[in-house]
Amino acid sequence: MTIEPIDWPMPQAEESPLKNGRGDRIRESKVGRNLAAIAGTYLILLFLTPLTMPADSIPDLSGRANRFDYATIDGTWSWGNNDNSDYEHAGHDQEVNGGPFAWSDLNPIAATVYAIGDLNCHQKHYRSWEINGNQLAVCVRDIGILFGFVTCCLIWQQRGLNRWTLRDTFLSILPDESIEKFYYKDQRLMLMIAIMGIGLVPMGIDGFTQLLTSYESTNTMRIITGVPAGFIGGWLFSAMFSARPHEFDSSEDVRLPADAKLRMV
């Protein structure tokens, strides 16, 4: 008599739900990774571009934020190449500060790096770092902002969770036990605002005091205040792109700290 072994089916381990009640966090991880990749690539290029360009090919710059000032030498968007020494908060006489400059004359990668800097930053040379005799495309504060942004996005990639609403998704990278009391008292929106204030207020005080008084900040202070502001920016953007109610069957499926429940009004 021969006894044949019986192939019993192996029990399938059920996927353990995460602390938000879902079975995976693929989207949240992708959001953090993609945002970190975009901002991180630009941050790296900010240093590599002046390093690989011929020495002393980028002069001292001084433009205006949120507009193009160095696109051409004397055509459209060439404000920075004029004598703007009479302006109190922006510009200088470019002719005596290294001569005219146009990022449109650079190679495509360098042109993109300096065009983004031109649009987003004032590019004041005494508030910027220099590599190989070439001024970086953005100021030191913006370097800090980008560094903080990338750091937070990398943390989000590991810890961030979709919890239906923006505020609950935003708070998801904090340990649940550390914020339970705010859920008991339904003060999580206040907590989110307070966290954002802690990150943004120092930069606001430093920047506006400098703008409205004779106070002149230092590059050390600019980067110190820029990093937490950028961290908050990365935190907020990650939460905005991760909060997706449609990934739950209903609001009752969302797990929150302190066993709180979402109330749909």
Image (cartoon, grey):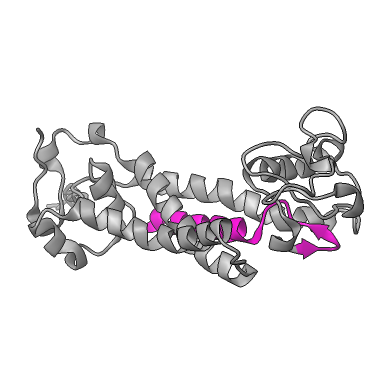
Q: Which portion, as a residue range, is magenta?
A: 130-158
Q: How many marks?
A: 0
Q: Residue at x 75, y 48 (%)?
A: 91
Image quadrant in which the C terminus is located: top left
Residue 172 appears in the rendering = no
Q: Is residue 196 left or right of residue 78?
A: left
Q: Residue at x 76, y 42 (%)?
A: 109
Residue 137 appears in the rendering = yes
Q: Residue at x 62, y 66 (%)?
A: 216
Q: Residue 120 at what x, y percent from top left?
A: 62, 43
Q: Main secondary structure of the magenta part?
A: helix
Q: Is residue 157 left or right of residue 243?
A: right
Q: Residue 102 at what x, y percent from top left?
A: 84, 40
Q: Residue 60 at what x, y percent from top left?
A: 82, 55
Q: Is residue 137 above or below residue 262?
A: below
Residue, far top: 76
Residue 38 highlighted magenta (yes or no)? no
Q: Is residue 185 above or below residue 27?
A: below
> In the picture, residue 101 is in which quadrant?
top right
Q: Is residue 104 left or right of residue 173?
A: right
Q: Residue at x 57, y 56 (%)?
A: 211
Front residue of 41/214: it is 214
Residue 145 highlighted magenta (yes or no)? yes
Front residue of 250/140: it is 140
Q: Residue 261 at what x, y percent from top left?
A: 8, 46
